[in-house]
Amino acid sequence: MNESETKIAHVAGGLILHSKTGKVAIVNQNGDSWSLPKGHIDAGETAEQAARREIKEETGIQKVQLIQPLGEYERYRIALGGGDDKSELKKIQFFLFETDQDKLQPEDPHNPEARWVDPEEVASYLTHPKDAEFYTKVALPVIKRDYH
């Protein structure tokens, strides 16, 4: 497959920080990979609206407050069994949100589990190396600087 056959997907997601515990919500996808909640931006949605919708679908968190945009990065989708599926390049925009909602209850059957994790442990869960790199280099320093 050459790059001209690669589909570009515009994706938005949220790093959700629990306002009382300081923990971060992560989600399990298809029972075989972990990430921060994110998904495709639907027609007519802004990136922030898509991030809020994906957070609700993948964690059950309904009440989030936007803190700040965290930036964006690109990566290929995760192939079944790991590795890169070069049929789709994701252009991912991330936002930092805060919530005081404790219970995580995913609505999306493709995301069967969500859990609260200490910020220092999040990167060790994230399946895709680019997700872990973005989290470690961009998101975690913001959390440490502004929330600890």
Image: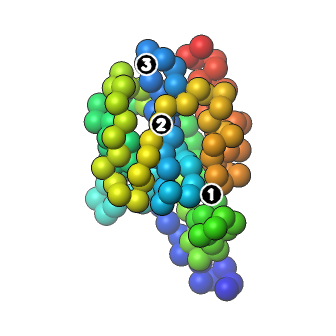
Quarter the N terminus occupies? bottom right
Q: Residues within 10 Å of mark 1 (few under 14, many from 20)?
A: some
The mark that comes first in sequence, 2 or 1, is 1
For residue 116, side relative to residue 109 (left or right)? right
Type of amino acid under label 2: Arg
x, y (%) of residue 8? 53, 70
Q: Residue at x 48, y 17 (%)?
A: 21
Residue 67 appears in the figure:
no
Q: Residue at x 69, y 36 (%)?
A: 136
Label 1 sits on what residue type?
Glu
Which mark lies nearer to you, 2 or 1? 2
| Callout 2 secondary element | strand
Looking at the rendered structure, the secondary structure element under dot 3 is: loop
**Which one is nearer the viewer's eye here, 13 or 29?**
29
Q: Position of residue 64 (x, y in %)?
A: 34, 31
Q: Is residue 97 above or below residue 114?
A: above
| Badge 3 or badge 2: first in the primary sequence | 3
Q: Nearer the viewer, mark 1 or mark 3?
A: 3
Which secondary structure, mark 1?
A: strand
Q: Where residue 60 appears, x then y in whole percent?
A: 32, 40
State the residue in front, 27 or 138: 27
| Mark 2 closeness class: few <14, some 14–19, many ≥20 residues within 10 Å | some
Q: Nearer the viewer, residue 1 or 78?
A: 78
Give the distance between the C-alpha atoms of the residues marked 2 and 1, in whole angstroms: 25 Å
Disc 3 target residue: 19
Amino acid type at image mark 3 = Ser
Q: Could one spot residue 1 in this view of the protein?
A: yes
Mark 3 neighbour class, 10 Å CA radius: few under 14, some 14 to 19, many 20 or more: some
Quickly name the residue at label 2: 115
Q: Which mark is residue 36?
A: none
Residue wearing tag 1: 74
Q: Calculate the distance from the C-alpha at mark 3 to the C-alpha at mark 2.
A: 15 Å
